[in-house]
Amino acid sequence: MSVPSTGEERRAELAANLAQVRARIAAATAAAGRPEGDVDLVVVTKFFPASDVRLLAGLGVTDVGENRHQEAEAKAAESRDLALRWHYIGGLQSNKAAAVAAYADVVESVDRPKLVGALDRGAAGRSVDVLLQVSLDPPGRDGRAGADPAELPVLAAAVGDAEHLNLRGLMAVAPLGEDPAAAFDRLARIWHDFLVDHPEATVLSAGMSGDLEQAIAAGATHVRVGSAVLGSRRTLK
Ligand SMILES: *Cc1c(COP(=O)(O)O)cnc(C)c1O
């Protein structure tokens, strides 16, 4: 954002973007033959200030997502008076996991058993929802985030044993350079198999600004949308 805008201008901009995204979600939900309201929106506020989070809450947003611990922790603290659910969607280091579980309501990026104990300790006194992040990348790809589908049973068992964590579902990001529809179809099959043993895992978090339609067609129950609501992050640090 090169030109700083006033609060009123920013509110109008966010309201218009939000209306467009909600219309896209409604159209994709209907096109998939799914009931209205079947897909929840998590607005990804990373790189944008707490003042935007406040405006979004005023516009009816209930769920926000962040992917960097320090930034998320600070924004959640500044927004404590707002009735928002905070989703942590970023890569997790095990030495930060306990701190994340102290403010996050949902941790979507649990991809290895080592994180589970730390999250459970950090969540003590609260109850934190957990999604297991599944990798849709070929094994061995650089920067691959998420668990291999074959690792899900062990991860799910670890979360199941944790006192303060609730297993709620799966999360994934479509790999770069692949048709997202094909990747999300693969995810839908993984989720379908997973639900046999974990019927409580009813959340499928998939789809972002560029591919939410394909994710909803494949069965996503919630989408994580950043730039289509807040604007481009490219020029921001
Ligand atoms: C940033 C991010 C999003 C949102 O991406 P947009 O393309 O801006 O909608 C969704 N999910 C994850 C895991 C992200 O890191």
Image: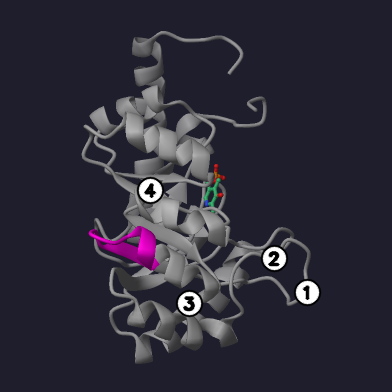
Crowding at mark 3 (Cα within 10 Å: few <14, some 14-19, many 20+): many
Q: If you read the primary sequence from the N terminus, does the residue marked by circle 4 or circle 2 appear first?
A: 4
Residues tagged 3 and 1 counted as in contact (Cβ below 8 A): no
Crowding at mark 1 (Cα within 10 Å: few <14, some 14-19, many 20+): few
- Marks 1 and 4 sit apart, C-alpha to C-alpha, by 30 Å
Q: Looking at the image, which residue is at 41% across and 85% down?
A: 157
For disc 4, the marked residue is: 42
- Marks 4 and 3 sit apart, C-alpha to C-alpha, by 19 Å
Q: Secondary structure at mark 1?
A: loop
Name the mark on residue 96: none
Q: Amino acid at mark 4?
A: Val
Q: If you read the primary sequence from the N terminus, does the residue marked by circle 2 or circle 3 appear first?
A: 2
Task: Determine whether 235 is above or below 28 in the image.
Answer: above
For disc 3, the marked residue is: 188
Rendering coords of residue 206 (x, y %): 48, 61
Rendering coords of residue 11 (x, y %): 35, 19
Q: Amino acid at mark 2?
A: Arg
Q: Which residues are magenta?
A: 120-130
For disc 1, the marked residue is: 140
Residues tagged 2 and 1 counted as in contact (Cβ below 8 A): yes
